């Protein structure tokens, strides 16, 4: 029992000695480090860059080579050989229409035109021969008159006969030409009706591509106001947009623009192919056509597209984040950091682009610009630069 008490006393003495050697007692607490002074901000180094104004308009995608097949008469469809979504080749039959009476009218009009043209050519040839002989007769009589072998009366009679024949030729050929033009007009009208239709009433694909619309149904009637079919040709697509009179002078063929097609989740650069210089009479807008890159996938005719034009370019200029520029009345200003303190700087601005603003005066490359926390600063405030969100 006595040994145990002695051992406990020795352990207590050793513990007390150890605490004393560490220089502190149980009632002392370590001092806290003082908080850093100044407003927490984020900065970025100012540099020169290129800025441009962005103008975004909405438009539509179209197939580069699209063919709309119309038949300008109502007709019954007797057979259908393809449906929307099919790939077709130029010359393929799409459907057959009952166009018996129209085809008969076309054949009759064609025969009438050929007959009228032949009559015109035949009569023209006959008159030319007659006139050539009469002109020779007048020349011969004038030569005979010079040697006293013909009279002036004979010359006058020959010239009168020539003039009468010329007048007769002009009148006859004019009538024949009118008939020929009437027959030709009938043929051309029927040509329009029967464009892309063969002699058996088969509607023929004029180009190879995807059959995107097919309105013909077996046993049904096609209308003269709606297309029988629409074919998208090459895979190459184009975008067509309408722009205002303020924007059109800034656009030229060959310029690039950004195109975003949300339905296909695609964004890419496109090239302006053409800019119309005459406004649409109804909308007073100007049509701009852009060629899309051939490797753009998932695009279909009719999809909507947002087209962003880059205009008013300024190169090698001071460009800062737009949110760094503060406004008070007509005054624009920023804060920079110099020697650990905020410096108030008034600036003049130029172009405004995609989240950035051009600074024309007040800043120079290499300065430290406050981009986060500037709204809490006054000129001369101490600052501390932090990374990440302040």
Image (cartoon, grey):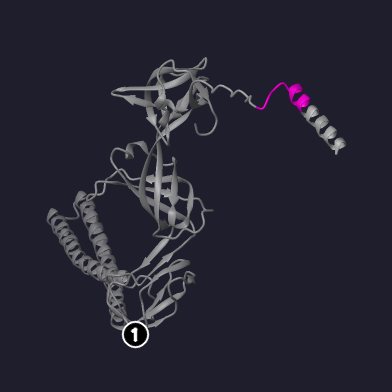
SS for callout 1? loop
Q: Is residue 151 left or right of residue 389?
A: left
Q: Nearer the viewer, residue 290 or 74?
A: 290
- In the picture as drawn, the residue positioned furthest to the front comes out as 2
Q: Position of residue 259 (x, y in %)?
A: 44, 48
Who is closer to the viewer here, 41 or 135? 41
Question: Quick one: label 1, few (<14), some, or many (20+) residues within 10 Å?
Answer: few
User: Which residue of the protein is positioned furthest toward the right in this rendering?
Assistant: 3
Report which quarter residue 138 is drawn in: bottom left
Task: Name the one closer to the observer, 17 or 242.
Answer: 17
Horizontal side of 130 relative to 200 (left or right) equals left
**Which residue is under mark 1?**
219
Locate residue 229: give its quadrant: bottom left
Tell me: residue 276, above or below residue 161: above
Q: Is residue 288 visible?
A: yes
**Residue at the outermost left position:** 153
Q: Which residues are magenta?
A: 16-26
Q: Nearer the viewer, residue 65 or 358?
A: 358
Identify the residue at image location x=29%, y=66%.
125
Left/right placement of residue 238 relative to residue 143 reads right
- In the displayed structure, 105 sits above or below 333; it is below
The picture places residue 50, in percent across and down from the top left corner, at: 47, 30
Q: How many marks?
A: 1
Which quadrant of the figure contains the N terminus? top right
The x and y percentages for residue 10 are: 83, 30
Residue 234, percent across and down?
48, 60
Indicate yes or no whether the magenta region holds residue 10. no
Whether residue 199 appears in this view of the structure is no
């Amino acid at each position: 029992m006595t040994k145990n008490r002695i051992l406990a006393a020795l352990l207590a003495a050793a513990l007390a000695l150890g605490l004393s050697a560490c220089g502190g007692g149980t009632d002392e607490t370590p001092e806290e480090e003082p908080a850093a002074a100044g407003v927490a901000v984020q900065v970025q180094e100012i540099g020169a860059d290129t800025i441009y104004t962005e103008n975004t308009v909405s438009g539509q995608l179209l197939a580069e080579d699209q063919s709309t097949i119309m038949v300008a008469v109502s007709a019954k469809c007797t057979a259908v050989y393809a449906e929307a979504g099919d790939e077709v080749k130029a010359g393929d039959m799409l459907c057959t229409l009952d166009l018996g009476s129209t085809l008969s009218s076309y054949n009759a009009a064609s025969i009438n035109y050929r007959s009228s043209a032949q009559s015109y050519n035949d009569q023209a040839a006959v008159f030319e021969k007659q006139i050539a002989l009469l002109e020779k007769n007048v020349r011969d009589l004038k030569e005979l008159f010079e040697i006293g072998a013909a009279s002036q009366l004979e010359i006058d009679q020959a010239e009168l006969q020539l003039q009468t024949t010329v007048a007769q030729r002009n009148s006859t050929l004019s009538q024949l030409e009118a008939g020929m033009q009437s027959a030709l007009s009938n043929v051309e009208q029927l040509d329009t009706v029967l464009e892309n239709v063969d002699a058996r009433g088969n509607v023929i694909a004029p180009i190879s591509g995807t059959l995107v619309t097919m309105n013909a149904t077996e046993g049904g009637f096609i209308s003269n106001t709606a297309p029988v079919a629409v074919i998208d040709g090459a895979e190459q697509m184009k975008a067509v947009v309408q722009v205002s009179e303020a924007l059109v002078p800034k656009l030229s063929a060959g310029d690039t623009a950004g195109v975003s097609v949300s339905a296909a989740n695609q964004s890419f650069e496109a090239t302006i192919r053409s800019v119309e210089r005459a406004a649409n009479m109804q909308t007073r807008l100007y049509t701009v056509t852009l060629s899309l890159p051939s490797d753009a996938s998932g695009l279909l005719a009719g999809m909507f597209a947002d087209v962003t034009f880059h205009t008013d370019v300024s190169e090698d200029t001071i460009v800062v984040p737009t949110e760094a520029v503060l406004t008070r009345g007509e005054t624009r200003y920023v804060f920079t950091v110099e020697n650990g303190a905020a410096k108030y700087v008034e600036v003049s601005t130029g172009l405004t682009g995609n989240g950035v603003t051009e600074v024309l005066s007040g800043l120079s490359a290499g300065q430290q610009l406050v981009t986060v926390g500037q709204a809490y600063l006054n000129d001369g405030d101490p600052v501390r630069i932090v990374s990440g969100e302040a």
